[in-house]
Image (spheres, grey):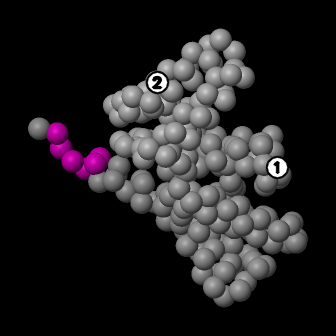
């Protein structure tokens, strides 16, 4: 739900009208019509039609989404840098696949779009360019949040290299989530439908 203003102060209306006039003068026929319609809505103060003036704007992405993505990227970067320094035998000890970065769920919020924009348009997190950023797992944020809890403890301890024991804590956090998901099914299996 976008936050379309229900009222716009006079001065702001005048500024918007002027901008629409400039854009109308440089646009093609279709754009010109759109901007003229917006000008009329603003001039007449048709508050009920204000959404038509702002229809090209998206809802703002909360800062928390950006912060969360940045934390997740920092965490993965620490994990990957640490694992890179291990011997092959150390790598084989752990179920590292369970920690894999799986992208973000396109249907459940703004993380996927924000991440895609950062990678494709802002050239940030280059290691993810060309990688699948769309998760096929709707509880993906739950996994990352469990991992972030461990990460946050390590950050507080000023730990920037992780041992196999440290990484195992991430794996345990993810695994405990899997077990919780499976529990209700087992409980359901014991119920009798009457």
Residue 191 painted magenta: yes
Q: Position of residue 24 (x, y in %)?
A: 64, 23
Q: From the viewer's perspective, tell me whether residue 114 is left or right of residue 39.
A: right
- Label 2: state its secondary structure: helix
Judge from the rendering whether residue 169 lies leftward or rightward of residue 5; answer left or right: right
Residue drawn at x 48%, y 40% is: 13
Q: How far across and down, in percent of the image, does residue 15 sit?
A: 56, 41
Q: Which residue is mark 1?
A: 123
Closer to the camera: disc 1 or disc 2? 2
**Quadrant of the frame with the N terminus:** top left
Tell me, yes or no, if residue 55 can be seen here: yes
Tell me if label 1 and label 2 are in contact, CB under 8 Å: no
In the rendered image, the vertical position of residue 137 relative to residue 156, given as above or below: above
Q: Which residues are magenta?
A: 188-193
The residue most toward the left is 194
- What's the CA distance linking mark 1 and mark 2? 40 Å
Please name the residue shown 18% across and 44% down the image: 192
Q: Is residue 136 above or below residue 146?
A: above
Q: Label 2, on which residue?
A: 40
Image quadrant where residue 21 sits: top right
The one nearer the camera, 135 or 32, is 32
Residue sitting at x 53%, y 48%:
60
Dot 1: few (<14), some (14–19), or many (≥20) neighbours within 10 Å?
A: few
Front in this rendered view, residue 6 or 184: 6
Q: Secondary structure at mark 1?
A: loop
Q: On the image, which quarter does residue 20 sit in?
A: top right
Point out residue 123 in the picture as x, y percentages from the top left corner.
Answer: 82, 49
Q: Is 60 drawn above or below residue 134 in the view shown?
A: below
**Residue 137 in view (yes/no):** no
């Amino acid at each position: 739900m976008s936050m379309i203003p229900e009222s716009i102060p006079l001065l702001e209306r005048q500024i918007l009208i002027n901008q629409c006039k400039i854009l109308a003068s440089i646009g093609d026929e279709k754009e010109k019509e759109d901007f003229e319609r917006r000008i009329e809505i603003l001039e007449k103060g048709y508050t009920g039609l204000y959404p038509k003036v702002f229809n090209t704007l998206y809802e703002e992405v909360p800062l928390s989404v950006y912060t969360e993505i940045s934390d997740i990227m920092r965490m993965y970067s620490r994990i990957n840098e640490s694992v890179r320094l291990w011997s092959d035998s150390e790598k084989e000890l752990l179920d590292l696949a369970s920690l894999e970065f799986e992208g973000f769920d396109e249907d459940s919020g703004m993380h996927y779009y924000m991440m895609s924009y950062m990678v494709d348009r802002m050239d940030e997190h280059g290691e993810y360019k060309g990688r699948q950023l769309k998760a096929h797992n709707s509880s993906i944020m739950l996994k990352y949040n469990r991992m972030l809890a461990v990460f946050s403890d390590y950050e507080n301890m000023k730990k920037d290299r992780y041992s196999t024991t440290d990484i195992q804590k991430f794996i345990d956090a993810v695994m405990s989530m899997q077990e919780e998901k499976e529990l209700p099914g087992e409980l359901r299996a014991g119920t009798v439908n009457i």
